[in-house]
Image: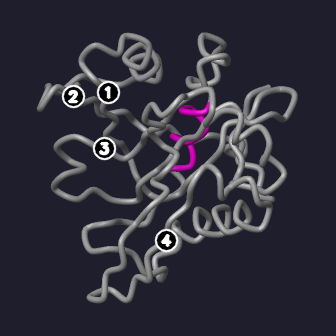
Amino acid sequence: MTHVVRPDRRYHPAYLEAVDEMAGAHRDGDGEWEQSPDDATGFAGYRFTREGLEDPAEFARLVRTRRAEELPETPRPSGRVPCTYLWIVDEEDQYVGSISLRHELTDFLLEQGGHIGYYVRPSARQQGHAGTALRQTLEMAHEMGLERVLITCDEDNAASRAVIEGAGGEYEDSRAGKRRYWVPTPPSDQPFGVRLV
């Protein structure tokens, strides 16, 4: 069964395979590989490369960076908010994509980015991974105290639109080529499916 997990070193090979499969296309929900230092906030900055991530130690640094980004006390550039990064894994426990949950909205995120972003590698699409991961992430958002979240997608992204609407997303409007949906975060009587590793 598809589930979301905290970033972990054991997904190293599959993560790199997915990056290669995306062939440079944007991986929404996976975070950026480069952030410039910000003296005003004490953020030291970081930079990762595809070649560098071949090294297990460098991949471990990426994992630590992603996991730290959800902590409010972690330094970050101005305008950035705490964000929980999760990895989507399939029934064989293989990495197939990423999903992120921003804990609050800035003016920009309210306009275009939203609370949640996600991607699934091309070879794993149309198998229900995105919908399942989104439902689990919505349950996590509810546990954080968010009663509803904003999710956006490109106007021409029919697949993402179907996933958002399938999760109960209510279309509000479109801005700068992005469809904006508000999605309720229903409580669950089950743990939200995040495997803490």
Q: Is residue 108 above or below residue 95?
A: below
Give the number of marks. 4
The answer to whether residue 183 is left or right of residue 32 is left
Between circles 2 and 4, the one closer to the viewer is: 4
In the current view of this chain or complex, which residue is farthest to the right?
A: 92
Q: Which residue is mark 1?
A: 153
User: How far from the left and from the top, in percent, is residue 169?
Assistant: 35, 25
* 3 or 1: tag closer to the N-terminus: 3
Residue beneath disc 3: 114
Alpha carbon separation for disc pair 1 and 2: 5 Å
Sequence order check, earlier mark of 1 and 2: 1
Mark before the other along the chain sequence, 3 or 2 = 3
Highlighted magenta segment, given as a residue range: 133-141
Local packing at callout 4 (Cα closer than 10 Å; few below 14, some 14-19, many 20+) is some
Instruction: State the mark number for residue 46.
Output: 4
Identify the secondary structure beneath mark 2: strand
In this image, 65 relative to 92: left or right?
left
Q: CA distance from mark 3 to mark 2?
A: 10 Å
Task: Tell me which label, 1 or 4, sits earlier in the chain.
Answer: 4
Report, in whole angstroms, how far the alpha carbon at label 2 lies from the one at label 4.
Answer: 29 Å
Between 9 and 152, the one nearer to me in the picture? 9
Q: Is residue 64 magenta?
A: no
Q: Are marks 1 and 4 in contact (CB under 8 Å)?
A: no
From mark 1 to mark 4, how far is it between C-alphas?
28 Å
Question: In front: mark 1 or mark 4?
Answer: 4
Which numbered disc, 4 or 3, marks the residue that appears first in the sequence?
4
| 189 or 125: nearer the viewer | 125
Q: What amino acid does circle 4 point to?
A: Tyr
Residue type at tag 1: Cys
Bin the neighbour count of mark 2 within 10 Å (Cα to Cα): few under 14, some 14-19, many 20 and up.
some
Q: Residue at left 49%, top 36%?
A: 118
Which amino acid type is shown beneath numbered disc 3?
A: Gly
